[in-house]
Image (cartoon, rainbow, N blue to C red):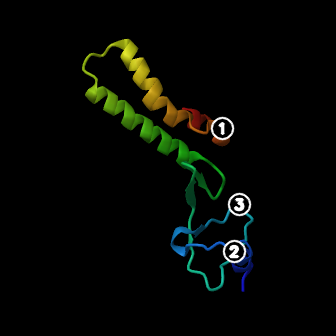
Amino acid sequence: MSKLESWALAWQTKFNVDKCTVMHIGSGNKKCSYQNSLLEFTGTQKDLQIWISNDLKFEFHTLEACKKANKMLGMIKRTDIHKDPRILVSLYKSLVRPHLEYCCSVWAPHYQKDKD
């Protein structure tokens, strides 16, 4: 019995192999394979709507957040007929900014390309 299986048995929990993946974090990682495991290996993973890569950089997350924000901007542009500045600011604050600011204290963009 593996350590993971014994831990799951002790805590009376089960793992769904289809929903679990393995990510090897760091450049010095040995990238061990797991015996009797059907777990897939991944380079990026989303957890709590934050994308993280195996090198612990959030570049993919910033790209995805910008895509979502741009989609919302496009929707506002297509649907707003009146172009009233008060309405545009309200729509921007409620629909676009949340995508750009969600958990920014966690991923804290410190590279200039991520800030841009």
Residue 67 x/y as whole percent: 43, 41
Identity of the residue furthest to the front in this view: 12
Mark number for residue 8? 2
Mark number for residue 108? 1
Residue 83 x/y as whole percent: 30, 16
Residue under the point 60% across and 81% down? 37
Rendering quarter of residue 5? bottom right
Q: Nearer the viewer, residue 41 or 95?
A: 95
Identity of the residue furthest to the left in this view: 81
Residues tagged 2 and 1 counted as in contact (Cβ below 8 A) = no
Q: Quadrant of the C terminus?
A: top right
Under circle 2, the secondary element is: helix
In the image, is residue 105 above or below residue 41? above
Residue flagged by tag 3: what amino acid is it? Gly
Residues tagged 1 and 3 counted as in contact (Cβ below 8 A) = no
Residue 46 x/y as whole percent: 55, 54
Q: Nearer the viewer, residue 12 or 101?
A: 12
- Relative to 26, is 23 on the left or the right? left
In the image, is residue 40 above or below residue 53? below
Residue flagged by tag 1: what amino acid is it? Ala
